[in-house]
Amino acid sequence: MSHLHLGIIGCPIRHSLSPVLHTYLLQQNGQEGSYRSFETQPSNLAERVSDLLNSGIRGFNVTIPLKQEILPFLTDISNAAKTIGAVNTVLVHDNRLHGHNTDSSGFMRSLQHSGIEIKQRSAIVLGAGGASRAVIYGLLAEGISEITIANRTLERARNLAVSMGRFFPETAISVCDWNIEKIASHISERALIVNTTSVGMWPDIDKTPFVLPALPAEAIVVDLVYNPLETQFIAQGKSAGASTIDGLNMFIFQGVAAFEIWLGRAAIFDLEVLRNLLLEKLASYE
Ligand code: ATR
């Protein structure tokens, strides 16, 4: 393939790690190309999309606050992205825009990488925003047995449970108040507890959604936050006796899945090398 012209749109994106990730992937896969940041506000999205099409771009990532705003510009949308209601990856082909959501597949690949089989598990998902939708879709599509959504604004959790329930009527989806005693009553032997909120993200590194109670040895605690790598939530999961997964692998796998869509084949990469590269970049911001 000739020069692969790639990029990311959103705002703010000055501190995005995606250029480092994709520049590494281009090099590792012997692919000539570039990945550039295009700071874009909702008000200039139409102009930006038209400019990108004219520039011969092969694809681009879409981040906050444009993951839903981009939908009307797309020729078609994958089933996953349609159900999630958000697109983070666009493939350009013959002047047409194809929308995908790799946040969801990235999350599932990060679980798979840690050897987690979700079929016999129940999940407790903290948060009911965009990241939560992608996580919940992935878990439901891969056959989790039960999901509980806890959110500070209960109404949002309810709406999410109802909208996902339409697509997955056979799985029990319940909601729970933003209260650790109530949440604790949903923690089963093989619970997967996922923080999809941004609570604990740098610079608020001393914050945590909840102080976790003692957990069964088979429980798994996952945080989507990766800056810092060991959030308070992850540290508590460890002291509460659970296995833990930080958010950096999900970030990497969503990027790899996007890159594979643009490249048209499986990508070669070394996870440890990538993690170190991204951690170095994060450290340079602080
Ligand atoms: P994202 O796309 O990252 O998920 P979002 O759609 O704005 O972002 O959703 C943010 C989520 O984090 C929501 O579930 C939000 O709870 P509310 O629906 O009650 O707003 C949650 N959240 C953000 N800050 C929070 C805080 N300080 N405590 C609890 N939940 C918080």
Image (tube, rainbow, N blue to C red):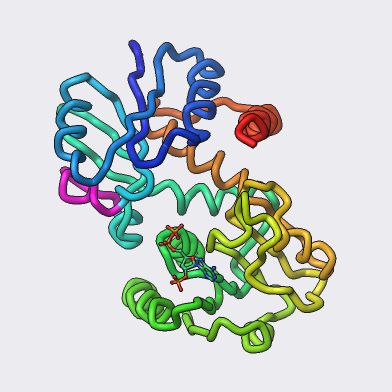
Q: Is residue 66 visible?
A: yes
Report if residue 56 lies within the magenta region. Answer: no
Q: State which region is magenta.
A: 68-78
Question: Along the horizontal axis of the image, is 103 left or right of 48?
Answer: right
Q: In this rendering, is residue 78 above or below 286? A: below
Q: In this rendering, is residue 79 above or below 14? A: below
Q: Nearer the viewer, residue 16 or 271?
A: 16
Q: Residue at x 73, y 51 (%)?
A: 230
Give the percent coordinates (x, y) of residue 6. Answer: 35, 25
Q: Residue at x 46, y 53 (%)?
A: 104
Q: Nearer the viewer, residue 108 or 11?
A: 11
Q: In this rendering, is residue 53 above or below 115? A: above
Q: Nearer the viewer, residue 142 or 233?
A: 233
Question: Along the horizontal axis of the image, is 269 left or right of 272?
Answer: left
Q: Is residue 111 visible?
A: no
Give the percent coordinates (x, y) of residue 210. Answer: 67, 73
Q: Residue at x 56, y 18 (%)?
A: 28
Residue 85: quadrant of the picture: bottom left
Give the percent coordinates (x, y) of residue 77. Answer: 25, 49
Q: Quadrant of the C terminus?
A: top right
Question: Along the horizontal axis of the image, is 212 left or right of 251?
Answer: right
Q: Residue at x 15, y 34 (%)?
A: 47
Report if residue 75 lies within the magenta region. Answer: yes
Give the percent coordinates (x, y) of residue 135. Answer: 49, 61
| Count of all numbered marks drawn on residues in the image | 0
Q: In this rendering, is residue 56 above or below 147? A: above
